[in-house]
Amino acid sequence: MAAVVLLAVAGLLTSPTSAQAHAVLLFASPAIEGAVPTAPKEVSLVFDEPVRPSGAKALRVSGPGGAAVSLGVATRSEGGKQLTAPVRTSMGPGVYTVSWQAVAEDGDVMSGAYRFAVGSATAGLASGGTGGQEVSGATATAVLRWTLYAAFALALGSLAGERIAARQRAPEGAAVPRSWALPGALAGLVAALGLAVLIAGGGSLVRGMTSPSVSDLVSGRPGILAVTEAAAWLAALVALRLGWRRTAVGVLAAGAVAEGLRAHPAAESAVWGPVLITVHLVAAAVWIGALVHVLRVGRAWRWSPPARAALRGYARVALALVVTVLVTGSLSGLLMVSPLELLDTGFGRLLAVKLALVASVCALALWARLRLSRTAPHLTARVEASALVAVLGATALLGVTQPPRDKNAALPFAPPPSGNAITVGGRADQIGIAATASTGQVVLRLTAPDTDLENTDEPSVSYKAALTLTTPAGRSRPLAVRGCGEGCFYAPVTWHKGLNLLTVRTEAEGWGGGRDTLRVMWPVRPDAELVERVVKAMRAVDEFTLHEQVASDTARTAVAPTPLKVTGEQFVDSEPYAKGQAPLSSRSIDADGNAVLALGYPGERLALELTLDAQDRVVRETLVAPNHIIHRTFTYPEPDEAGDGHDHDAESGGQ
């Protein structure tokens, strides 16, 4: 029995029901507590799990003085992990607050708020901002979840306890206590309906009953599962009322499956997560509910020999239940919480409290079983049952508490650019590099040769990357890098005004690796008009000499460039900016006073840097694509003072 106690403690330490988590806001654009130079065209939120917008309050933006900013309908992308809403009104300089509300996969309504600044109003952020999140209606959610877990124990456990007690003949004149399965089913129905109403009301029971959002219930997985679970409880209530106990057990098992499907481990493993949670929930419910029923039988039978025999029969069943709880809890709990984080977070400390309660229950159970042959476990049994009620309460509180998150864990996908952005590129040996820099972050995308960017069924390539930032003042520091998909890496970074050097060290399995230093001129200054002027100026050139050097790896960049005679029309038509447009652009001035135009095409992992002359013609160009790098210089026909008509190098210093 001592071994059983230890197994129970270990199993509930890693209980997945306790570790039920919520979607966490990872990134936002505009950035949380960040600033953008011009008004954003959209607001975008990225979560670590799929979410659904919660009614009309999914995304709201308020400006200085609380004035509301008009937004379009929030849409989902990236498998439901990203919410985006277009901005429909102009946003002047100032500090703005974004409030959001979303339904997580476990059915809880999450809400939060953060601020960002437009223009030069960054000083307003220093007064303290918002950026946290919470469960909307956390108290109501915790109470309803406690009721739901207790209902499973009373309904399923009482039915199991009835079968155990039925094996013993009641003493003469003693009656079997009335089953609590029917009241338990009624309580489960009320709790399940309450959780569904919370989803329909955006975390508010009052709003859910007075002005519910039916679309939130029928259009998303959490709402559908909540309605399904409520229907299961209703069917179980009817079956119990009609005396169909086996039918009730099957329907309650279906309700447990619905609960398992919306628990957080289901997001970690779509198959094993729900299976482990369902089995765990059923085993724990029978463990607790059957004990309560057997203890009630013992008291009604005045702890006569048949009563003690019933308790011993329960103890034998309890061994299998505890082992089941241990195995399922350990397997799914390891997906959620590290034992090293137990006392470092509020969630961990609450879990430790639950552990202490469970240890107390097991100790009381062991004491009661050891004394069973000598005396009736009156007081011990009551304390044990009370402790189990407290365990369910701790479980419900854990259900609305955010578990710890690994800050270095890989992201589900790359976060969107925050504010103005620019893509710069390079090569490390044979590996293509494209880095998109925006406010507070950089997203790095690596491409090995022969990689099919469109065919995701191709065998994956294992990449590694390390980043070092050197500021314009010459100070260098490494950046904390997180993965965001195959060949994708993210790092938070504070860009400094001027030329930032981003050193990339990378390798790819089977393709070697190396390092390259990318130039990031900050801040980003978009200039769409300059792109148009460059195209117009280049098309006006009748003919010029293009010196081109193409390389697929850095070892071949020493090859002499190839001179080509081309017209301006021919050259421009071969360029990605032929129509005078680019997704990302930034203008700067180099050390020689020449205008430099950086163009980025993140979707194609393409980056260009154009150095221009006074007539907006290109005199130097570097084009970086996933599988090659091109260096070009341009020589234009310029008549000299004597009118000899010979070609002259248009760039200072020539080739």
Image (tube, helix red, strand yellow):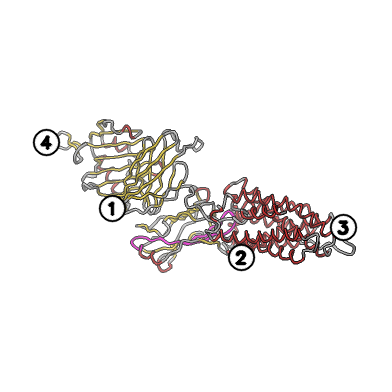
- Judge depth for marks 1 and 4 and give the one in front: 1
Classed neighbour count for the residue bearing mark 1: other residues with Cα under 10 Å, few (<14), some (14–19), many (≥20)? few
Q: Can residue 127 be seen in this view?
A: yes
Question: CB under 8 Å between callouts 1 and 2?
Answer: no
Q: Which residue position holds label 2?
A: 140
Find disc 4 in the rendering and name its residue: 643
Foreground label between 1 and 2: 1
- Distance of label 2 from label 3 (alpha carbons): 43 Å
Distance between the Cα atoms at labels 3 and 4? 122 Å
- Tag in front: 2 or 3: 3
The residue identified by callout 3 is 169
Q: Earlier in the sequence, mark 1 or mark 2?
A: 2
Mark pair 1, 4: CA separation: 47 Å
What segment carries the magenta color?
98-122
Amino acid type of disc 3?
A: Arg
The reply to whether callout 1 and callout 3 are in contact (CB within 8 Å) is no
Question: Mark 2 and mark 4 in contact (Cβ < 8 Å)?
Answer: no
Position of residue 475 measured from the top left corner of the image (x, y, whole percent): 31, 51
